[in-house]
């Protein structure tokens, strides 16, 4: 059985190497306007296009009406921390950004441009992204090394008038929280009364920690472990660089009330929940560490492309519920469940930013969607093929944004759902139609 699961886990990589060169990319630009005959180009281009140009010049807000800016975002990376592969460069990171753009379109009806920048300088990165603002409705930051990813996000959020979102932080944390909400219901434990071990404290777990606190978790019951050991006030290496590692030093002083010193084994001992965004495994998290956790333990090894421990190993060691970031195992806790619906809602309401409160609203709606259709140990979160989840998530996000007074438009819940459903249905059915007509060729048989 283990060998069968291991073979299954290797197949996506084999298929990817076969099919990426077959299609030479995953996204393309398609027309969305009618072209009845060649004379229509007089409307869509010169001379007719001058009229909407003049209208936008006189009334800048009309750019949202005359162009696709309101449904366009940029997926921007420098390729310095791609999945679990590390600093592989902008060219090597492009397949990931294309894949992200495909998910944005198919799951959220959002037009996303994959952009990999040829710089590692955070200041150049920031200035370049700022220059994109006139033509996009939002920015999705992706696969940027820490600690610069935090400064890039904070700076761009402060300087831009459109939503800027770092999916490795906010998106990952949102979906993981949704899964944890339902997992705790299954095991009968309360978030505010449990012990949580967090292995790794990069972009994903920094945001997860922030959302956990906002959702009611007790910081004192959280033990965080980075590559050098557990966090606590005695970590002078972090204290000396606290201006650079602001979030990590704050966590040193807020968490680990018992002042546990050690590594992952000590952090996980007696824990009810383990959340890992660390070095891809297997072997990063050992079965004996899982065995030392509390009864009915929840284990989320979420490194990509390979989790820190294989799910079956965690189960054999005593974990009751296991979730990973992969679609080929039960309980996928992948940010693909979050960003398409969240951005759909953000764009439909023209929100100025994406707040933690909006992310929490999305997380609770995701958890609710799964609970309504039934949850169990191997099914704690929605799956990507439950497409109605995404318009519901969009509505939850947009309604919270309106409640916070950070939107340019106001819509009812019913209007938001209709808009989101229409956009997502159009995207999905367009792909199916193109496949049916052979315009997207069928993949060759293995």
Image (cartoon, grey):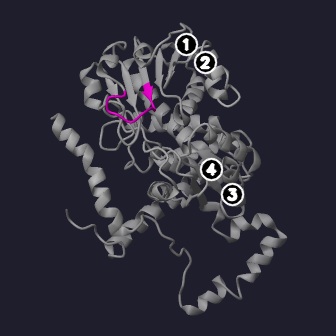
Residue 354 percent location from the top left of the image: 65, 43
CA gap between label 3 and label 4 equals: 23 Å
Mark 4 vs 1, N-terminal side: 1
Question: Is 388 situated above or below 364?
Answer: below
Mark found first going from the N terminus, 3 or 4 = 3
Q: Do labels 2 and 1 touch, CB within 8 Å?
A: yes
Mark 3 crowd level (few <14, some 14–19, many ≥20, 10 Å Cα): few
Image quarter for residue 129? Answer: bottom right
Q: Which residue is mark 4?
A: 346
Cα distance between the residues tagged 1 and 3? 40 Å
Q: Earlier in the sequence, mark 1 or mark 3?
A: 3
Q: Residue at x 65, y 49 (%)?
A: 121
- Image vertical order of residue 362 relative to residue 32, above or below: above
Q: Earlier in the sequence, mark 2 or mark 3?
A: 3
Q: Residue at x 47, y 33 (%)?
A: 176
Label at residue 256: 1
Q: For mark 2, what is the residue?
A: 252
* Horizontal and vertical percent position of residue 253: 64, 15
Residue contact at pointers 4 and 2, CB within 8 angstroms: no
Q: Are marks 2 and 3 in contact (CB under 8 Å)?
A: no
- Dot 4 surroundings within 10 Å: few (below 14), some, or many (20 or more)? many
**Camera-side residue: 189 or 199?**
199
Write down the region rendered in magenta. Answer: 275-284
Mark 1 or 3: the one toward you? 3
Q: Secondary structure at mark 1?
A: loop
Q: Calculate the distance from the C-alpha at mark 4 to the C-alpha at mark 2.
A: 34 Å
Does residue 281 show up magenta in the picture? yes
Residue at the disc numbered 3:
128
Q: Main secondary structure of the magenta part?
A: loop
**Which numbered dot is residue 179?**
none
The C terminus lies in quadrant: bottom left
Distance from the alpha carbon under mark 4 to that under mark 1: 36 Å
């Amino acid at each position: 059985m283990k060998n069968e699961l291991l073979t299954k886990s290797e197949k996506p990589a084999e298929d990817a190497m076969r099919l990426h060169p077959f299609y030479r990319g995953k996204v393309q630009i398609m027309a969305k306007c009618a072209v009845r005959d060649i004379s229509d180009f007089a409307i869509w281009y010169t001379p007719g296009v001058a009229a909407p140009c003049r209208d936008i010049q006189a009334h800048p807000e009309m750019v949202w009406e005359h162009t696709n800016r309101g449904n366009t975002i940029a997926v921007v990376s420098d390729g310095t921390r791609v999945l679990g592969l590390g600093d592989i460069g902008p060219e090597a990171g492009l397949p990931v950004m294309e894949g992200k753009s495909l998910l944005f379109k198919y799951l959220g009806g959002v037009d996303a441009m994959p952009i990999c920048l040829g710089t590692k300088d955070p200041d150049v990165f920031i200035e370049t992204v700022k220059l994109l603002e006139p033509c996009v409705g939002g920015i999705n930051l992706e696969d940027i090394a820490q600690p610069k990813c935090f400064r890039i996000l904070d700076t761009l959020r402060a300087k831009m008038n459109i939503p800027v979102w770092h999916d490795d932080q906010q998106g990952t944390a949102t979906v993981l929280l949704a899964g944890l909400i339902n997992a705790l219901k299954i095991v009968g434990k309360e978030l505010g009364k449990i012990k949580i071990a967090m292995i790794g404290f990069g972009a994903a777990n920094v945001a997860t920690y922030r959302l956990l606190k906002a959702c009611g978790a007790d910081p004192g019951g959280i033990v965080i472990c980075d590559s050098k050991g557990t966090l606590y006030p005695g970590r002078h290496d972090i204290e000396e660089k606290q201006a650079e590692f602001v979030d990590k030093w704050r966590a040193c002083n807020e968490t680990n009330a018992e002042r546990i010193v050690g590594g992952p084994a000590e952090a996980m001992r007696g824990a009810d929940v383990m959340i890992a965004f660390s070095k891809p495994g297997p072997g990063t998290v050992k079965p004996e560490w899982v065995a030392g956790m509390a009864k009915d333990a929840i284990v989320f090894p979420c490194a990509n492309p390979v989790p820190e421990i294989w799910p079956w190993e965690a189960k054999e060691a005593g974990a009751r519920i296991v979730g990973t970031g992969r679609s080929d195992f039960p309980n996928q806790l992948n940010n693909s469940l979050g960003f398409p619906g969240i951005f759909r809602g953000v764009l439909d309401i023209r929100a100025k930013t994406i707040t933690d409160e909006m992310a929490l609203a999305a997380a609770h709606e995701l958890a609710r969607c799964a609970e309504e259709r039934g949850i169990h140990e191997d099914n704690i979160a929605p799956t990507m093929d439950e497409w109605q989840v995404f318009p519901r998530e969009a509505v939850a996000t947009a309604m919270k944004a309106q409640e916070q007074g950070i939107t340019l438009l106001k819509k009812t819940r019913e209007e938001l759902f209709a808009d989101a459903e229409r956009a997502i249905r159009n995207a999905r059915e367009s792909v199916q139609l193109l496949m049916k007509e052979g315009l997207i060729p069928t993949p060759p048989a293995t």
